[in-house]
Amino acid sequence: MNVRTMFGTEGTRLTRLCLVADDLTGALDSAAQFASVFGPIGVRWCAAAPAVAHGVELAQAGRIHGIVTAPLNKEALNKAGHHFAGHTDMLAHLTGARGSVMMLARGNMRVSHVSTHVALEDVPKKLTPERLRYVIELTDDALRGLSLSRWRIAVAALDPHAGEGGLFGRQDIDVSAPTIERCVADGFDVVGPVPGDTVFVKLRAGQYDAVVAMYHDQGHIPVKLLGFSVDPATGTWNALSGVNITLGLPIIRTSVDHGTAFDIAGKGIASETSLIEAIDYAVKLAAARLQIGNA
């Protein structure tokens, strides 16, 4: 496991980032050899956690302007004694953040999430006025950090048809709608709740600049559906475009929008597209933060 430093430019700003990556995986010749070292599914031990922690230390010390992380196997992380649902929760713990928000980005598809790695039956309990307000605020801040010309946010409905007047649930009516109204009164450009079956079409059409999704699959599916490049002749995918951005941290962190893919380790067929995009996003966000700090 290695933490590498790299440099990027955005305009005339020079930013220094670190890339947290697993060198050992790339050095192995095959998936079988990988399994012999890490176990059948790569969970015998996990060296990723110390590397992530070191990256956070560098960022908090001001030696770098952000971190870019490669995929992390959550099962391996937990079996190694680091009990987190993934990078996002771990980074919030390491930095002392009061909370964090996952945003996925691919082109103009920017989607932040009220909840992520929780059972679907627990999602309604995660939708509170406080949490929704927090996600809206961080999403607005992220859009401003990307130097967009506007920051219009749509909140996706939790229930079908935004509850259909209470026929299909009252979370959108009793929680989301009043919270959105208060945000609008405070100056945020936010609309909703917008039914989940149309909100992402409108986002892709440019009617919004970001969507707040209620749960993991609601937000991930549209971004990944557009991000996968599929070979129609073989029915397999050959590239994945998209970036995972952690909002709410005192440091900048971006990551790829895919998993570890142990099954293709050593085959030389993994795509670098998402990692390159994650680095580009980190450079943009770091440059914007440096500009604000020097203003």
Image (tube, rainbow, N blue to C red):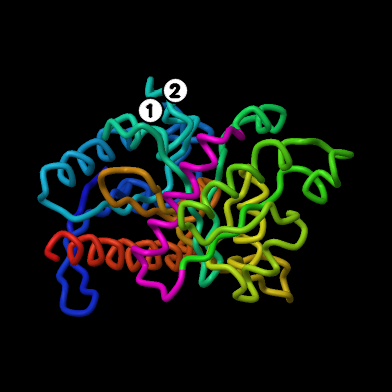
Residue at 38%, 51% (x, y): give it: 70
- Residue 140: in magenta span: yes
Taking depth in this image into account, of 184 and 209 the one nearest to the observer is: 184
Distance from disc 2 to disc 1, alpha carbons, whole Å, reads 7 Å
Q: From what the image shows, is residue 10 above or below residue 159?
A: below
- Residue 144: in magenta span: yes
Residue range corresponding to the magenta coloring: 127-150
Which residue corresponds to mark 1? 45
Q: Secondary structure at mark 1?
A: loop
Tell me if label 2 and label 1 are in contact, CB under 8 Å. Answer: yes
Quadrant into which the C terminus falls: bottom left
Tell me which secondary structure the magenta stretch mostly adopts. helix
* Type of amino acid under label 2: Lys
In the image, residue 207 lies at what x, y percent? 62, 73
Taking depth in this image into account, of 123 and 148 the one nearest to the observer is: 148
Q: From what the image shows, is residue 192 above or below residue 231?
A: above
In the image, residue 282 lies at what x, y percent? 31, 61
- Viewer-nearest of labels 2 and 1? 2
In the image, residue 261 lies at what x, y percent? 52, 49
Furthest-bottom residue in this view: 11
Q: From what the image shows, is residue 271 above or below residue 19?
A: below
Taking depth in this image into account, of 293 and 25 the one nearest to the observer is: 293
Q: Of the numbered discs in the image, which one, if any, rests on residue 79?
A: 2
* Type of amino acid under label 1: Trp
Residue at 27%, 54% (x, y): give it: 19
Q: Secondary structure at mark 2?
A: helix
Q: Dividing the picture into quarters, in which one does residue 208 lie?
A: bottom right
